Amino acid sequence: MRYGGAFGRAPGSVLLERGVALRTLTTAFRRAAEGAGGLVLLSGEAGVGKTSAVRHFAGSVHTSARVLVGLCEPLSSPRPLAPLLDVVPSMGGGVARTLARVRGGTPASELFDSVLGELAGHAQVSLLVFEDLHWADEATLDLVRYLTRRLASVHALLVVTYRDDEIGRTHPLSVLLGDLAPIAGVQRIALDRLSRSAVAELAAGRVVDVDQLHQLTGGNPFFINEVLAAAPDAIPGSVRAAVRGRLARLSDAGVAVVEALAVLSTSAPPDLVGELARDAPEGLREAIDRGLLTVTGPVVAFRHELARMTVLDAVPSFRRVLLHRSVLAALLKKELEDDQLALVVEHAVQAGDDAAVLAYAPLAGQRAAALGAHREAAAHYGRAIALADALPLAEQVRLLQAACFEYYANADLAAITDCCARLLRLQRQLGDQLAVGDSLRWLSFLRWSAGLARESLRLANEAVRVLEVMPPGPELVRAYAHLVELGFYIHDVQSARRYAELGSALAQRLDLPDLELRVRYFANAARMLHSDDGWDELEEIREAAVAGGNLEHIYDDGRAPRIRRLPS
């Protein structure tokens, strides 16, 4: 995606008090052109002018650089890698081909490698812009982290914008910013609100009280422009009133268009808007002329997110539901792409269409997980689980298995414990004793992680009792191994020895060398609680695990539930 229309300032607009920011961007770009790329973090509150500054800068370099712009979107479960998907059509075909392979199961890391290779191999210096990173999914944040660590020798500059007043201490973007702090080549720009003198310059030629305007808006450029545009003869009481005042001057066709676009929550092609609103071409022209909407390449969008939020808030709840249903119907009548699944789920939730949520949320979760966006995957699976009672028991089991893995990937102990307990109940209803035993072992591990040692031991012993009456298999070896580990943790050397003998014998019988090493490792560690003898054997076990490629099994014996891929 490129910035629509002419680069630089919009007609009639003035870019004020942004000289330092533009000079910093220019310096970083010159270094990138010389082969020393990097990252610029451009932050500020909503409406402070981040997009305007980047657009102005892009206009100053677009004749000598390839400018690529991707947008993050305000969805409750963002589309995985949304900003990258925006720019893939303008990148080399290798990136698109790798993306197609990732959709088929190839690791997402190969896509990151492909993007870096494309930037490094392009003839021109590249300016890659990701806007609104505070809305980014987990995979997009990983991509930014990956690129930042590798751009130092690439002729490409990555610029990301975000709202610093919308990310708290635990926000995923805050974690990323902390990770990037020590990396050379990272520049930070914080845009401030405009001063009174800048507000006076913006209001020049209008009959307004500049002091009152500055006080009312706090120097926020968007607020200022909205207030000035809404009522030339008076200042509204708030920006909300300013946007609604502009909305009130639209015809029915114009109102229908902006309401439909507000519900869509992202930019959209005019033909999609036309399916949601009558007389859409006339309404679009009017809304664009009034300054509410703007055209960016092949799509139309709100000039500012705050305007969209204000319009959406003004849409009656019953009409909002009807619009979401219309959007959902429009999306589903065409062949869906994987990258649209998150949008489908969003509109299905807002439309109250439980059947659509149940059908598409698991697919959206599977898609997000494949791209490494585990937080978003867990959210999608959570929506489906809330409605899962309508599914046959076997389908509920598959859904819960997939969800458990995503909760595990997110280290959400409460969610995975609840999910595993529910999974265990269903497996008991189905009479699947093998799965019951394995889930008991897994739930035992979770209880131990929560500090509930007595409950953990009870579940671990129950798992062994259930599995010992079944034909012996890997599940029973894992249950023995888990009890050996618990014996080590609670200093019960006798119990650890007893289950180690059982586990080692069965692992040898079933030819499971990875599990045998795990049993031996913790049995030896338990023995060393009362003796300093055994360090050499412990090291030998570890070396054997490394040689066999089984090191992870020493520390993680298949704790995550057995996952089956959901059908597409």
Image: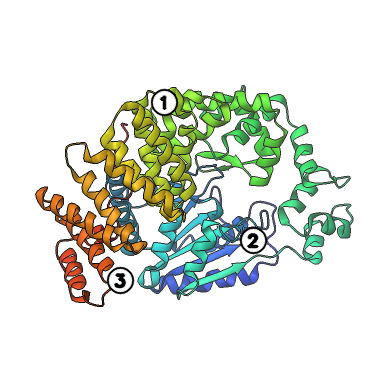
Left or right: where does residue 129 sit relative to residue 485?
A: right
Q: Which quadrant would residue 24 be assigned to in this image?
A: bottom right
SS label for mark 1: loop
Residue 218 image offset from top left, x and y in percent: 78, 59
SS label for mark 2: loop
SS label for mark 3: loop
Nearest to viewer (mark 3 / mark 1): 3
Instruction: Please name the residue that numbered disc 3 is placed on.
Output: 529
- Towards the viewer: 196 or 188: 188
Q: Residue at x 40, y 50 (%)?
A: 456
Q: Which quadrant would residue 262 be assigned to in this image?
A: top right
Using the numbered discs, state the Cα–Cα distance from disc 3 to disc 1 in whole angstroms: 64 Å
Q: Amino acid at mark 3?
A: Leu
- Cβ atoms at labels 3 and 1 below 8 Å apart: no
| Crowd rating for badge 2 (residues with CA inside 10 Å; few <14, some 14–19, many 20+) | some
Nearer-N-terminus badge (3/2): 2
Instruction: Please name the residue that numbered disc 1 is placed on.
Output: 334
Residue 15 image offset from top left, x and y in percent: 67, 61
- Towards the viewer: 354 or 525: 525
Nearer-N-terminus badge (2/1): 2
Nearer-N-terminus badge (3/1): 1
Q: Quadrant of the C terminus?
A: top left
Instruction: Please name the residue that numbered disc 2 is placed on.
Output: 44
Q: Amino acid at mark 1?
A: Lys
Scheme of image coloration: rainbow
- Towards the viewer: 343 or 395: 395
